Image (cartoon, rainbow, N blue to C red):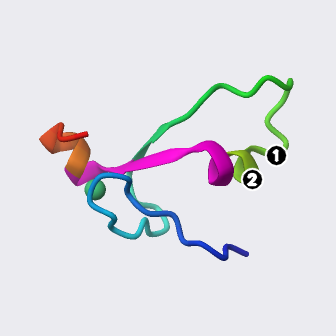
Amino acid sequence: MLLDEPRCTVCNKEIKEEDVVLVKMRYPKRKGFTEIKAYLRNEGKFICEACYNKKSY
Ligand SMILES: [Zn+2]
């Protein structure tokens, strides 16, 4: 249940399911990744494949 759809931080394109993305994030302090989805939503910066290929980030 996402209130905010994830978007590419470079071009603001909406990230769709199964899109290839890069995630720039700080590695979690806590052990384990049980809350990884919530963590990514809060901390992750997504970069879509097109922007990655252009290396414009
Ligand atoms: Zn992009």
Residue 12 vertical position relative to residue 54 in the rendered view, above or below: below
User: For the N terminus, which image quadrant?
Assistant: bottom right
Quadrant of residue 12 within the rendered picture: bottom left
- Residue 47 is a magenta residue: yes
The percent position of residue 56, horizontal first and vertical second, equals 18, 41
Locate the C terminus and report the quarter of the image it occupies. Answer: top left
State which image quarter holds ligand 1: bottom left
The answer for how far apart the CA atoms under marks 1 and 2 are is: 5 Å
Q: Classify mark 1 as within 8 Å of ligand 1 or not, answering yes or no.
A: no
Question: Quick one: label 2, few (<14), some, or many (20+) residues within 10 Å?
Answer: few
Query: Does the segment drawn in magenta span residue 54?
Result: no
- To which residue does mark 1 refer? 35
Q: Relative to 37, does residue 29 appear above or below in the rendering?
A: above
Labelled disc at residue 10: none
User: Is the residue under label 2 in contact with that under label 1 (CB below 8 Å)?
Assistant: yes
Q: Secondary structure at mark 2?
A: helix
Other-residue count near label 1 (Cα within 10 Å), few / some / many at <14 / 14–19 / ≥20: few
Locate residue 11, reporting x and y percent.
26, 60
The residue under label 2 is 38
Element carrying mark 1 = loop
Query: Residue drawn at (44%, 49%), measured in percent from left and top?
Result: 46
Q: Is residue 4 left or right of residue 31?
A: left
- Image location of residue 24, percent across then percent down: 48, 35
Residue 14 placement, left or right of 41: left
Lateral position of residue 44 relative to residue 36, left or right: left
Q: Nearer the viewer, residue 45 or 22?
A: 45
Q: Amino acid at mark 1?
A: Glu
Bounds of the magenta span?
40-50
Q: Residue at x 75, y 53 (%)?
A: 38
